[in-house]
Image (cartoon, rainbow, N blue to C red):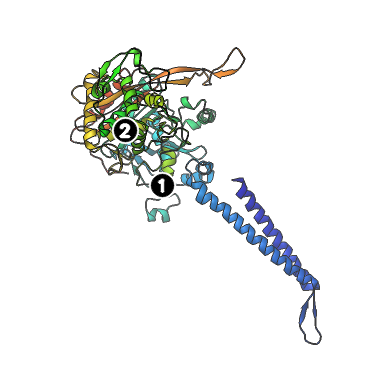
């Protein structure tokens, strides 16, 4: 940003200097530099006039060169730098006080939940007796989605993603007659009541976590909760807000930052944050590949000594040392046998897994630069690039390149290897299985959206078989006894082990010294609790994914939370003849 500024200043200074110099030369040539021929009466140029002409030509050339250079640099910032969603230019533009001043100069539109009712508005104005105040009724329960907006501290969430729409005057008359034009309203797919309940369920675990609930078949986001959270007006305490931002910007402290939207793996202000390891929920992907490929008759043995992959030295065992004996695919999925799926993944092979991973838009090279899954979301209001900057998740990743070994594949096949996923990516996996034709569809925040298939994942027959297997997990498998029999649910539990940093009371990583005096950041094991699934099992209307960090087994923490979310969706009418009627009201 300093180069074009310096060039612009230099250009202006040289232009003024050249103008002054040329004017002085012209004046001197007029007074002293010409003579009249007595015979012909013609004016003849002197050396002074010739010198002035030379300087004019030199100045003209310099001026043209400067114009080209300045134009080239400005073209670079507009047409190239702007194309990278995570570039420093895009971030600077989002924080530019001039842009924020324009956004705050008028009254922005309201944001309504799917009911369209005034009392359920997610973002609205309130008169506090002195002025109109931009208000966020969901508070901490929805700030990772609604975001916030402030002239000094910028914006995040919907406020940032849909800023172009919310600040666009609602009518030509309003634009011409009012010094403070009122922006357009926006109705989103979220259910404000369900959002509060989902957030409450995640927060009640007492641990960080997240949940996503999608309305099928269009994958409209009904709820997306993330904890820990913060109040939308937190920036009013400048010192506290500065601490939150510094914590979010530091890779060492980012995993505990309230500014992280754990459902998407991003910061509420935009940009990538981190992934989760999916644990046994990822067996859903491996089972889908096996069913679609016809590799369903394999029987493998789960032994007390574990399974050792070819060319590996470390055996793979089941959680808690369980031994399941010899079994087939359906029983292995129902009982969540690690050793079976490790062997099944090796049997399916790297190339076949890579093919199916790409159908779901997963990256298959862990060494590739982390990218965001742009153009996945379906939007019809506002700007796609601005939306992606805020809400596009880091692309899910596996290690299926040529350098991957059978041991790598075995670990990934039960979710404990190089699997890097977000809660949203696991919810989309569940929704793909729930769809009648086994297709991946784009998620959306906009209500009444039409379904937008992105790619075919597995065949309709394979999807039907996998749905039956996921139902068996709830009825007689690892999630047996958790869900209410009145609402048939299909799903998969997961228990994911990973190493996490240890923090002190001030939120700083704990540093230890070894006997040689070298510093090491202290880590400890974390067992994340997972559940993904859909309901009702026989005619899916919602798909969901839940994770609780260090929550233990999936059936103990995440599945009960999922059960209560399903119950709430049922009480709100999402399973009785379709979703509740979406209103198209407004102010």
Image spot of residue 41 (x, y percent): 77, 85
Category of crowding for the residue at label 1, using alpha-carbon neighbours closer than 10 angstroms: few (below 14), some (14–19), many (at least 20): some
Image spot of residue 186 (x, y percent): 35, 43
Category of crowding for the residue at label 2, using alpha-carbon neighbours closer than 10 angstroms: few (below 14), some (14–19), many (at least 20): many
Q: Quadrant of the N terminus?
A: top right
Q: Is residue 219 left or right of residue 514?
A: left
Farthest-out residue, bottom: 39
Q: Is residue 292 left or right of residue 7?
A: left
**Residue 132 visible in the picture:** no
The residue lying toward the viewer, choosing from 306 and 586, is 306
First in sequence: mark 2 or mark 1?
A: 1
**Residue 41 visible in the picture:** yes
The residue lying toward the viewer, choosing from 291 and 523, is 291
The residue lying toward the viewer, choosing from 456 and 177, is 456
Q: Which residue is mark 1?
A: 383
Judged from the image, the secondary structure of the residue bearing numbered disc 2 is: helix
Residue 581 position by quadrant: top left
Q: Is residue 48 left or right of residue 494?
A: right
User: Vertically, is 330 above or below 223?
Assistant: above
Residue that appears at 49% across and 32% down:
235
Residue that appears at 36% across and 19% down:
205
The label shown at residue 89 is none
Residue 206 position by quadrant: top left
Q: Which residue is mark 2?
A: 429
Q: Quadrant of the C terminus?
A: top left
Image spot of residue 486 (x, y percent): 18, 24
Residue that appears at 27% across and 36% down:
458
Image spot of residue 163 (x, y percent): 43, 44
């Amino acid at each position: 940003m300093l180069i074009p500024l310096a060039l612009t200043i230099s250009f202006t200074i040289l232009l003024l200097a050249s103008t002054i110099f040329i004017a002085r030369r012209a004046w001197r040539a007029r007074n002293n530099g010409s003579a009249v021929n007595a015979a012909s009466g013609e004016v003849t140029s002197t050396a002074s006039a010739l010198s002035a002409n030379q300087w004019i030509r030199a100045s003209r050339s310099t001026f043209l060169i400067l114009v080209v250079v300045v134009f080239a640099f400005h073209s670079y910032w507009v047409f190239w730098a702007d194309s990278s969603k995570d570039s420093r230019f895009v971030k600077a533009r989002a924080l530019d006080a001039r842009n924020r001043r324009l956004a705050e100069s008028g009254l922005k539109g309201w944001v309504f939940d799917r009911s369209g009712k005034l009392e359920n508005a997610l973002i609205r104005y309130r008169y506090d007796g002195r002025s109109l105040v931009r208000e966020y009724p969901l508070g901490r329960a929805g700030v990772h989605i609604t975001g916030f907006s402030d002239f000094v501290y910028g914006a995040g969430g919907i406020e940032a993603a849909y800023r172009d729409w919310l600040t666009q005057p609602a009518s030509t008359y309003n634009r011409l007659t009012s010094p403070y034009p009122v922006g357009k309203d926006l109705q989103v797919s979220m259910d404000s009541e369900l959002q509060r309940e989902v957030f409450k369920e995640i927060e009640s675990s007492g641990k960080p976590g997240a949940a996503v609930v999608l309305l099928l078949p269009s994958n409209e986001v009904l709820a997306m909760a993330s904890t820990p959270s913060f109040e939308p007006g937190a920036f009013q305490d400048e010192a506290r807000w500065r601490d939150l931002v510094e914590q979010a910007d530091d890779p060492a402290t980012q995993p505990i930052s309230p500014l992280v939207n754990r459902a998407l793996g991003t910061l509420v202000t935009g940009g990538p944050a981190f992934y989760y390891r999916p644990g046994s929920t990822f067996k859903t992907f491996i089972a889908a590949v096996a069913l679609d490929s016809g590799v369903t008759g394999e029987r493998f043995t789960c032994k007390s000594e574990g399974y050792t992959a070819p060319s590996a030295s470390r055996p793979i065992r089941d959680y808690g040392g369980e031994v399941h004996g010899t079994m087939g695919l359906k029983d292995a999925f129902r009982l969540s046998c690690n050793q079976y799926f490790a062997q099944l993944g090796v049997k399916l092979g790297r190339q076949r897994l890579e093919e199916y991973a790409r159908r779901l838009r997963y990256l298959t090279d862990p060494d590739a630069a982390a990218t965001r899954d742009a153009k996945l979301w379906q939007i019809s209001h506002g700007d796609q690039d601005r939306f992606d900057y805020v809400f596009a998740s880091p692309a899910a990743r596996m290690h299926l390149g040529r350098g991957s070994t059978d041991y790598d594949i075995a670990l990934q096949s039960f979710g404990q290897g190089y699997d890097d996923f977000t809660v949203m990516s696991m919810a989309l996996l569940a929704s793909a299985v729930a769809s009648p034709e086994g297709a991946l569809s784009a998620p959306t925040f906009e209500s009444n959206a039409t379904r937008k298939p992105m790619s075919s994942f597995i065949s309709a027959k394979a999807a039907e078989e996998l749905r039956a297997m996921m139902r068996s997990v709830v009825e007689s498998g690892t999630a047996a006894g958790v869900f209410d029999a009145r609402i048939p649910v299909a799903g998969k539990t997961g228990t994911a082990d990973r190493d996490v940093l240890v923090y002190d009371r001030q939120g700083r990583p704990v540093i230890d010294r070894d006997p040689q005096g070298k510093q090491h950041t202290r880590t400890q094991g974390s067992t994340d609790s997972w559940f993904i699934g859909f309901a009702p099992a026989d005619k899916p209307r919602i798909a969901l994914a839940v994770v609780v960090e260090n929550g233990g087994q999936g059936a103990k923490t995440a599945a009960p939370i999922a059960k209560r979310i399903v119950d709430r969706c049922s009480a709100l009418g999402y399973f009785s003849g379709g979703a509740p009627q979406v209103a198209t009201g407004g102010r």
